[in-house]
Amino acid sequence: MTFFIQMLVSGIVVGSIYALVALGFVLIYKASDALNLANGEFVLIGSYVCLTLITVLKLPFLLAILITLVFSALLGLMVEKMVLRPLLNAPTISVIMATIGLGNLLAGLTHVVWGHQTRMYPQIFPDTPVTFGGVIITPVYLWSFVIVMSLLIAFTVFFKFSKMGIAMRAVADDLQAAASMGISVKKVFAITWAIACVVAAVGGVLLGNINGVNATMSVIGLTVLPVVILGGLDSIAGAIVGGFIIGIAQSMAGGYLDPMVGGGLKDVFPFIIVILILMIKPYGLFGKGGVERV
């Protein structure tokens, strides 16, 4: 039972980070109907930038992460203006291909600047384990969960009640109608990409504190894809729920099934879950199916 709870806690923490990164994925899809396949590279760059500020410039963690978030927001604004805005009226497949090219470009730049070796964050969170009912939880897991949940609640309130959040929801619902009501679609797209890069950077920093940073961290972009498909590509709530489901399932597969098959099942288990769920609910758990009049 203790091992089960340990795996459950690990899955919840990692799943919360998946949910945060998936949030940016869903926002961009809702705004432009396109998948951002460069999401993993935004996670990787955010983690490397924060690590560099801490280890090279010797900045305190809070200041380093603040600068990282500003950098990530500016990166998102620049990407939207230079790469995506010229494709505003282009077919969706063109936007998707542009994000693939962007991801390859960012991955190449990351390898040139930071190399391929794994780099570890210095000790930032307390190192004294916390014990709950015999289950040992490391502080980095506990703090990561608290930070992610706080951000998810903050963004939920922002989307529901703020003027910009309402504008983003209007653009996601009907772009042409929102534009006719005076909402600046270009501004909404820019803010959307900025938020997506910011949440990706936060996820990267937290994952970097847990596992270290190397080029393989960008694979989270593919891991998060089953999360958003499972929850529903156009559902923010689905991204959050899907993140927890995939995180817990992946942790359980790694703890119980990997030893039985020799390893490797943990990485593909999220895709197996997605296939099974989509056989029952083709639009995901919370996705809305389109109705076409013929």
Image (tube, rainbow, N blue to C red):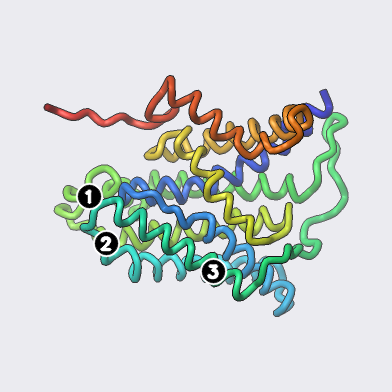
Q: 269 or 7, which lies in front?
A: 269
The local secondary structure at tag 1 comes to helix
Dot 2 or dot 3, earlier in sequence: 2
Residue 222 vs 12, above or below: the answer is: below
Q: Please tell me whether mark 2 or mark 3 is closer to you in this view.
A: 3
- The residue shown at (72%, 78%) is 56
Dot 1 or dot 3, earlier in sequence: 3
In x, y percent, where is residue 13?
67, 41
- The residue shown at (33%, 59%) is 189
* Extreme residue toward the front, this view: 262
36 left or right of 2 in image: left
Task: Determine which of the numbered discs, if any, sits on residue 108 in the image.
Answer: 3
Tell me the distance, in whole angstroms, between the alpha carbons under discs 1 and 2.
15 Å
Q: Amino acid at mark 3?
A: Gly
Q: Amino acid at mark 1?
A: Leu
For disc 2, the marked residue is: 87
In x, y percent, where is residue 83?
35, 67
Q: Please tell me whether mark 1 or mark 2 is closer to you in this view.
A: 2
In x, y percent, where is residue 91?
24, 53
Task: Determine which of the numbered discs, if any, sits on residue 175 in the image.
Answer: 1
Tell me the distance, in whole angstroms, between the alpha carbons under discs 1 and 3.
34 Å
The C terminus sits in image quarter? top left
Q: Quadrant of residue 233?
A: top left
The local secondary structure at tag 2 comes to helix
